Amino acid sequence: MEEGVVNEILQGPLRDVFDSKQLITDISGSGNNWAVGHKVFGSLYQEKILEKLRKSAEHCDCLQCFFIIHSMGGGTGSGLGTFLLKVLKDEFPEVYRFVTSIYPSGEDDVITSPYNSILAMKELNEHADCVLPIDNQSLFDIISKIDLMMNSGKLGAAIKPKSLVTSSTGVFKKRQEKPFDAMNNIVANLLLNLTSSARFEGSLNMDLNEIIMNLVPFPQLHYLVSSLTPLYTLADVNIPPRRLDQMFSDAFSKDHQLIRADPKHSLYLACALMVRGNVQISDLRRNIERLKPSLQFVSWNQEGWKTSLCSVPPVGHSHSLLALANNTCVKPTFIDLRERFIRLYKKKAHLHHYLQIEGMEESCFTEAVSSLSALIQEYNQLDATKSMPVEDLPRLNIAM
Amino acid sequence: MSIVTVQLGQCGNQIGFEVFDALFNDSHCPGGLCSKRENEAYQASCKERFFSEEENGVPVARAVLVDMERKVISQTLSKAARSGRWKYGQHSCFCQKQGSGNNWAYGYSVHGPRHKESIMNLIQKEVEKCDSLSGFFIIMSMAGGTGSGLGAFVTQNLQDQYSSALKMNHIIWPYGTGEVIVQNYNSILTLSHLYRSSDALLVHENDAVHKICAKLMNIKQISFCDINQVLAHQLGSVFQPTYSREGSFHYRRNPLGDLMENLVPHPEFKMLGVRNIPQMSENSLAYSTFTWAGLLKHLRQMLISNAKMEEGIDWQVRPPLSGLPPLGKMSVNKETHFNTSIANLVILRGKDVHSADVGHHRALKRVLCAEHLKIQLSILPG
């Protein structure tokens, strides 16, 4: 809802990729106010947005899903973004809505981000088919780790150029301030790997609708924790199987997750492994067997793995892995968010900016926070079953 | 008589390619134990079953390829064309763009009715090319969406439209540790529908074939291509021509009929499995010798101890003396449980096949023979 960022794209190297008729901008932005984004700009631009969407959809032979990429803490992304979800659901009910949301981390520069996030969460709960939460702090930690690796200059451990999951130019730059480009590159890679099996050939393909089908056991629980490995490739060309296995182990460690989460110590509802490159089914099987004992799966889905193999590796790597997990480790993020919201809300701080928008009332806030609480409760219930042994219910046996 | 193959889904198409490749290579491989006339008769019989002639002499597989997305089919078509020795018909494939999303219901209730006309037309065209139809061989997986759901739908339609033709479904049992999370739903739904509409279900388990690749073929990094090649080898040993009573230049004409007649004595029991011996890598073949007695002994023990391959066979399992298990007594150790078969078929292929003595093995009943190049021994327990 402001022109600066979009103009920058139009003048950058990718200007020909975007159709200039498919851009909508306004002047003043949303002022970090969810209500402005959702109620004001929503109603103002609904027709225009719908028209452009319909135009794009007409070009498609077969429309499968929408990707919505936004942040939760701001005004436009959060407010208008979630408004769009409802519109898409009404207008294109059979098309899946995949949302990549950037959650605010602890040290966030937007003071009202808890309000915006909680209000947006309610919409995500109800209208999104699948959400991939990501937070800036985790991305930043990953970048720092890469930087450390690059600068420590271990003997013989030179990193292959163009193999960083963050680099698009292959040039190593020293970064002082928050390196948003590199962080965004990680998210871009996430989306690339997600769609790789749909775009390239492989021996075990996986489409986007299969992701939702397999990883969302109940419509409410559609938050997937993602992790990308490897983050860089060493210049050593021979990758012995040990390195391949290391890639799998890393995918489950808490340092590689794109959100603050520790999946190993929480309960898995389902897990998907998307492998790209020169990895075969035996490697995949071996690693699943190896890692399974250290992971806890929910009692009704003990073998809950979805696997896919794509033959084409990403640029600069010989193989890569994207792990998507429906895991109760997203709970701490939500609980954190709720804490920060309650701290602000108790004092009614900054509330008047929202309430002065037509259509916003205090009930919006209370509804939003109770929807989040219900979600947290669902996860709590699942966690409670964590250490219980798998029940073998008496079942009708077929005589063999 | 000819067999029309229907390949469904990614699994079906990938396996189908390997099967046709194996069948073609087997019937055309040079040098061997038989005379030229015998070889030609064998080739002709194999061709009649699986390939039809094209104008420029390149055999075309009698197959219909179906998938709900393009990539696998185009890959399969190009791989076949690249070999230059056989290929798929240009117009024998049907694909869509959206996939089935691992959803059985999508395959069965949405794609099935929507595309019934087109798919059945393609099959009809293929059937019309045959002089006489033995039946259909439908290759599908159980865990996915297209293979399982659409496969069940197509089989049902084949039963309605071609009620006098036999249908054998080749189903792939997914890995136990999961390759698709909803595979159990998809598999149960598929099995329940197929049981009513198919005549025989030939089952191959991914786990078992994976072990064969690892232990017997000594492949370090097993890919789906390797697994499919082992599968194709086993299927080839079942479907390639076998001698008829008249002697070595005459082959039995009705492959599916033979299999059903011997293996499915009662319509309620239609699940079949294959055990094949010997299975080993090409390198080891040069250092091995075989005798019929040895092979038959191993195969029989594999059967009664329920082993899927010739390594790790439990030799402790013996048939109970009276021929019937004693009433009211369960065997304490599950592994020594004797595996009783409803029906068996042994197919022997190789040198001096008539000298093989199958008679004294109580567990092995009917025998079909063929003398050709590779030594293969297969048994299908019902």
Image (cartoon, rainbow, N blue to C red):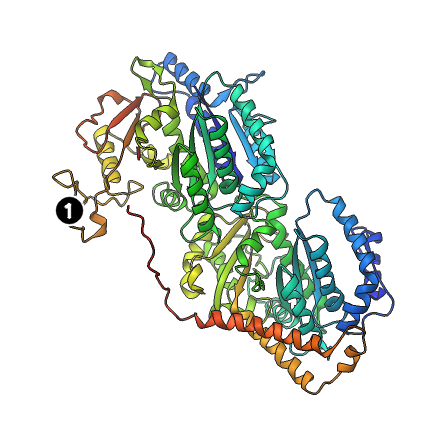
Label 1 environment density (alpha carbons within 10 Å; few <14, some 14–19, many ≥20):
few
State the residue lying farthest toward the left.
B322
Q: Is residue A263 left or right of residue A120?
A: left
Q: Residue at x 15, y 41 (%)?
A: B320
What amino acid is found at the position of numbered circle 1 in the picture? Leu
The percent position of residue B346, horizontal first and vertical second, equals 28, 29
Q: Residue at x 58, y 40 (%)?
A: B111
Relative height, residue B220 to residue B156 (above, below) = below
The percent position of residue B166, horizontal first and vertical second, equals 42, 27
| Mark 1 residue element | loop
Report which quarter residue B173 is drawn in: top left
The percent position of residue A41, horizontal first and vertical second, equals 81, 66
Q: Which residue is mark 1?
A: B327
Classify the position of the N terminus of chain A by image quarter.
bottom right
Q: Chain of mark 1?
A: B
Q: Is residue A162 visible?
A: no
Q: Is residue B128 visible?
A: yes
